[in-house]
Structure formats: C-alpha cells, structure tokens
Image: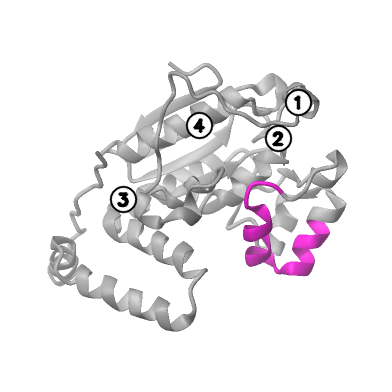
Amino acid sequence: MYQEIKYDVQDPIAVITMNRPDRLNAMTTHMLAEIRHALASAEADGRVVGMILTGEGRGFCAGMDIDALDGISKDASFNIDTTGLEADPGDPSMGEDFVAGFTYMLALRKPLLAAINGPCAGLGFCFAMLSDMRFVDANAKFSTAFSQRGLVAEHAVSWLLHRLIGSSRALDLLWSARKFDGVEAERLGIADRLCEPGTSLQTAKDYIAQLAASASPTSLKIIKQQVYRHMMMPLGPAMSDTQRLMDESLTRPDFKEGVRSFIEGRPPSFDRIRVG
C-alpha cells in the first residue's frame, strides 16, 4: 500500500525503509505520512518487539526533498496530507510534550532504531536523533544542513542533540552544518554502534532479536517512557515516579517469569505488547 517506503515485518522486527534511492531517500510530505502510518502499524502489531528505520540504496535520508522545500518557501507552510494514511502512533499517557511535530516517535511503545547506511542530513538527521538508538555504517556521512538553508534547528533536534553530545558540540554541528562520518559520529556520541560498511541494518536486527529473546517488552516500553519523561523532571519527582512504576512491576506476570526463568536457567517467555 505504500508508495515511498517499504514496510516489512519478520517476527520480532519491523523494518521501515525510506524508498526514494534516486534522491538519496529525500523526504516528501507523502513519505512523512507513510512513515507515521507504518510506525503506528508496527506499534500495534503483536509480533513486533522493535522497529528499524533505514534507507534504500546508498543513503539513509538526504533531508527534505528540494522540490518540496521550494514549495514550502513559496507559501511558508509545512503541511502533511495524511488522507488515507491516518494514524495515531505513540502512547498518549506520555503527555502533551510528546505530540508536537515528530516527537510522537519518542512516545512509541516499542524501541525504534535508526540503521544509518549512508548520507543523513537535514530532516533525515532529525529522524535519526528522534530514534532511540543509532546504528551507523562507518562510512555514513552526516550534516545538520539547516543553517545553510536559512533555517533553524528543526523538529526537536535543539532539545535532543545537546543532551547527546553537549551544548558546544551541538552548536558546532548546527552552526557550521559541516559534514562528518560515522567514525566521528561515534566519537561525538551520536552513533551508539559503529558498524562495518553495509552492516548497520543487520546489526540493528540482531540487537532487536537479542532483546526479544531476553527482555520483557513491557519493561522496554516503561523504561523508554522513564528516560524521556524524566528528562523534564527534577530528581525528586522522577524518583517518586520510579518507585510507583517499580511497585506496579512487582505485580506483573513478567516479574514472576523473569525470576522463575533465572532460577530454572532457561530463557524467559514474556508476553508481547498489543495496542488497540
């Protein structure tokens, strides 16, 4: 059903592939709607433990398509037509901080990994930052690009980037829009796994498969929520929230299964998350 992405589910992994390789997977408003719809589908699929966003061909995503940017520059608006692709991904209990723009990606109930296989710039860079982890080919190339287009740090990247790498490094990348490779991305703290060229997608798949074999999907969901929500809380309220969540976890079947499987020396068998 999709025109500009590929969507493939192989238990326990959903792979969403931006599919405009002739344009280095530059985004259109239609692609943005398709990605949102596919993420909602994967979130609701009981087979899926984790999701991967990647690019077809030799690029991850070169940013917003220049023709789309030209159109936006003429009417100064950024509208996404979701007709036929209506979707509501993300956990609404995360609150209003996680509904603006593309921040719904932080509220997804399942891990979202970016497998960065080539050029990653502009809005593509934002989507990489909004992913929970980044698996990066060593020869991938990054650039924020915004300052060179007369733009600002878009789509939560001003909030996320300095938390990952510090304010001065974030300003450098945002001001200069200089290009840097996967090796430097790891040194900066942007790449969570540095991969041999051509292997980032498989490495990300292996990571999700390992999670599916050993971790409670409910625990993965709640830990993700803790990390992002607690970024905006003082220590005291964060600890109170953690205590409440811990008390709730002690009553779940997953806790009993986790303890019993450890005692019996076998892999745990946890229930998958189903939404809706």
Mark 2 → mark 3, Cα distance in angstroms: 32 Å
Q: Is residue 93 above or below residue 88?
A: below
Return the residue at label 4: 35
Mark 3 closeness class: few <14, some 14–19, many ≥20 residues within 10 Å = many
Does the stretch in magenta take in 157?
Answer: yes
- Residue range in magenta is 154-173
Residue projecting furthest to the bottom: 236
Q: Position of residue 105 (x, y in %)?
A: 49, 46
Q: Which residue occupies 41% across, 60% down?
A: 224
The picture places residue 23, in percent across and down from the top left corner, at: 71, 23
Q: How many marks?
A: 4
Q: Position of residue 129 (x, y in %)?
A: 61, 51
Task: Say which of 209 and 75 sits in front.
Answer: 75
Which is more foreground, mark 4 or mark 1? 1
Query: Given this view, does label 3 or label 4 mark the residue nearer the observer?
Result: 4
Residue located beneath label 1 in the image: 75
Q: Is residue 247 left or right of residue 34?
A: left
Could you give the CA–CA distance between mark 2 and mark 4, rounded to whole angstroms?
A: 14 Å
Task: State the image quarter where residue 93 is shown.
Answer: bottom left
| SS label for mark 3 | helix
Q: Please, is residue 53 above or below residue 267 in the view?
A: above
Q: Which mark is residue 63?
A: 2
- At 68% from the left and 28% from the top, the residue drawn is 26
Task: Tell which circle, 3 or 4, labels the residue nearer the N-terminal end.
Answer: 4
In the rendered image, is residue 222 in sight? yes
Q: Check disc 1 and give the amino acid type.
A: Asp
Q: Secondary structure at mark 1?
A: helix
Q: Vertical placement of 246 versus 202: above or below?
A: below
Q: Which residue is mark 3?
A: 212
Q: Nearer the viewer, mark 3 or mark 1?
A: 1
Would residue 212 appear left or right of 146 to someone viewing this image?
A: left
